[in-house]
Image (cartoon, grey):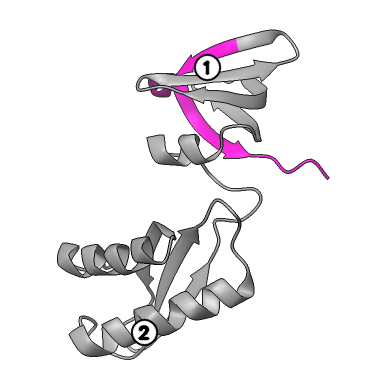
Amino acid sequence: MAQLAGEVLERIENLLTAMGVELVGAELTGPKRRRLLRITIYRPSGVDIGLCEEVSEVVSSLLDELDPIESSYILEVSSPGLERSLSTFRDFERAIGESVRLVLKGGSVVEGVLEEAMPRGVKVHSEEGSVEVAYEDLKSARTVFDW
């Protein structure tokens, strides 16, 4: 997986911030002749198709100007999704109040509502009450959409 240069990501992030949108991730994948640039965005009020189109137009114009990708590529803009992986402190902050499933390195599972994201771990309200889990003890974490 190739990455965009830091200054390109910074320019994209600045544009999105001005739009009230947060850049969650940017990933450049695929073979040289068929690249895919996947931009994932977040906005507290939600991400809809109209916002994705607007972000796509703005980012596309910037990339046309900077030309940081040597070959042709497809630009895809999307939300993180209803059920998404949580790996960074900011991911956990955005998920406060949502249902989560944490798999610990020892194999046990904690499910409940994410109450707090702290510098060293998270607090989840589960059926057993509030449970604190250190980031270092996590094997994986994701949001769970209650259907």
Measure the alpha-carbon separation of dots 2 and 1: 44 Å
The residue tagged 2 is 60
46 or 66, nearer to the observer: 46
Placement of 67 over or under 50, stated as above or below: below
Whether residues under marks 2 and 1 lie with C-beta atoms below 8 angstroms apart, the answer is: no
Question: Which residue type carries mark 1?
Answer: Gly
* Residue 25 position in % (x across, y down): 39, 58
Placement of 83 over or under 102, stated as above or below: below
74 or 123, nearer to the observer: 123
The residue tagged 1 is 106
Q: Residue at x 53, y 44 (%)?
A: 85
Q: Residue at x 62, y 10 (%)?
A: 130
- Please state the extent of the stretch shown in magenta in the rendering: 131-147
Q: Quadrant of residue 15?
A: bottom left
Residue at the farthest right position = 147
* Earlier residue among tags 2 and 1: 2
